[in-house]
Image (tube, rainbow, N blue to C red):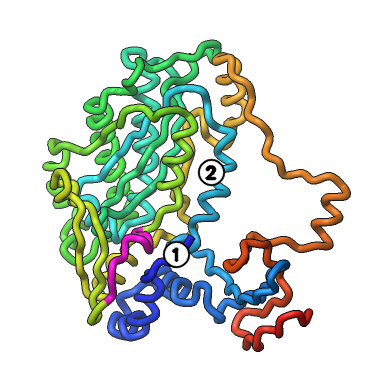
Amino acid sequence: MARPALEVADIFRAFGPAWRLAQHGHLSLGQLKVMSAIEQCRTAALGGHVLRCEACEQIDISYNSCRNRHCPKCQARAAQRWLEARQADLLPVEYYHVVFTLPAPISAFAYTNKALVYRLLFEVAAETLLTIAADPKHLGATIGATLVLHTWGSAMTHHPHVHGIVPGGGLSADGQRWIACRHGFFLPVRVLSRLFRRRFLEELAKAHHAGVLRFFGEFAPLAQMAAFLRWLAPLRTSEWVVYAKRPFAGPEAVLAYLSRYTHRVAISNRRLVSLDGGCVSFRWKDYRAKGRTRHKTMTLTAGEFMRRFLLHVLPCGFHRIRHYGLLANVERRQNLARARGLLGATPPDEPRTIASAPEATALSTTPTTGFVCRCCGSVMRVIETFARGATIRAPPLRGVTS
């Protein structure tokens, strides 16, 4: 795939150093690390290797990736590996896409309490799904769910929400039957919204009582419990956005959809349009508009672009993909095996990861890469590596081995 004409890394390299100085004391260590990783990604600073084509002997230099989960260039392979591992979890049933969104006041407050509020968003959304699905008035089954955290809107504003991918059914209480949803309908979104709202506000009030919330700037007065409860009052009656989309075309479509959501970052390089005069233009989608007017172009100063990008740096060690219910890691294999038995489905094929002895010997003596020659399409072999920060020597002459 061709390299985009403009990348997030280009913006950070051009304007990051000066902006860092201007924002001294206002950026977290995590944000500074992300800036550094993106700036150095696939440059000599991280080292790399020299490649030579087996057919035409074309020489190329490939630099190492930063592998930071916030880097737009380092997510494709991670997403592919994750999807291959999840392929074994698919069941031959309808799958639904549900979304739980926090209202704007809590989104603003969440920025200085990311770890706690994001955790509550996951836990309360999962609890809501499992509780309503287990209710005999609705489904009466134990379901599974994979939840993925997104913290941004199309314009890179702070907009925390979780996307859930849920099989259309679950196991009965005794585990002896598979209970399917009605065709084309998962669970009532109004009931989900009301329970999600109530439980989230209850947990937020408990967190305040436990003294684990932090209050800065305009939210400083909320450190007083009485003021905090008054602030929560309007949120108890406002509408909280929860919705469930129609089912996917089939289990295979779930993986294609997940590939666009699991390892996405605040903005992809392909949405960038131009960098001109210290301003960045990028494509975005205005969901309040309709038709062709929904797709627009926004222009921000480079500083504001970087500020918005760094709003979405996650707390260190925070897991943004989580599994619940039947798909929880503890008993996932047993639950899926039982579900397949009840559905009369065959187990998925085992991934081809084990090579025979002769193949293993060949692989150990002949290193292979995923690099393909841009000139003739043949495999390129690594003939030299250089360490992080080392000086790269001139590429070897054609026909001369390392």
User: Quick check: is 269 in the magenta stretch?
Assistant: yes
Nearer to me, 165 or 275: 275
Which badge, 2 or 1, is on the more N-terminal residue? 1
Q: Which range is magenta?
A: 266-275
**Number of marks in the image?**
2
Q: Nearer the viewer, residue 68 or 313?
A: 68
Within-10-Å neighbours for mark 1: few <14, some 14–19, many 20+: many
Q: What residue is rendered at 22% in x and 75% in y?
A: 301
Q: CA distance from mark 2 to mark 1?
A: 19 Å
Q: Could you tell me the amino acid type at mark 2?
A: Leu
| Above or below: residue 354 compared with residue 282 | above
Q: Of the numbered discs in the image, which one, if any, rests on residue 83? A: 2
Q: Residue at x 51, y 50 (%)?
A: 79
Residue 201 vertical position relative to residue 5 in the rendered view, above or below: above
Q: List x then y, in percent, for residue 122.
A: 38, 42
Q: Position of residue 23 (x, y in %)?
A: 29, 80
Position of residue 281 in the picture relative to residue 34 (left or right): left
Residue 225 seen in render? no
Residue 311's x, y, as percent?
31, 63
Q: Where does label 1 land, which residue?
A: 71
Q: How many neighbours does mark 2 have within 10 angstroms: few (below 14), some (14-19), or many (20 or more)?
A: some
Quarter holding residue 9:
bottom left
Give yes or no for residue 76 being in the magenta stretch.
Answer: no
* Residue at (58% x, 71% y) in the render: 64
SS of the residue under disc 2: helix
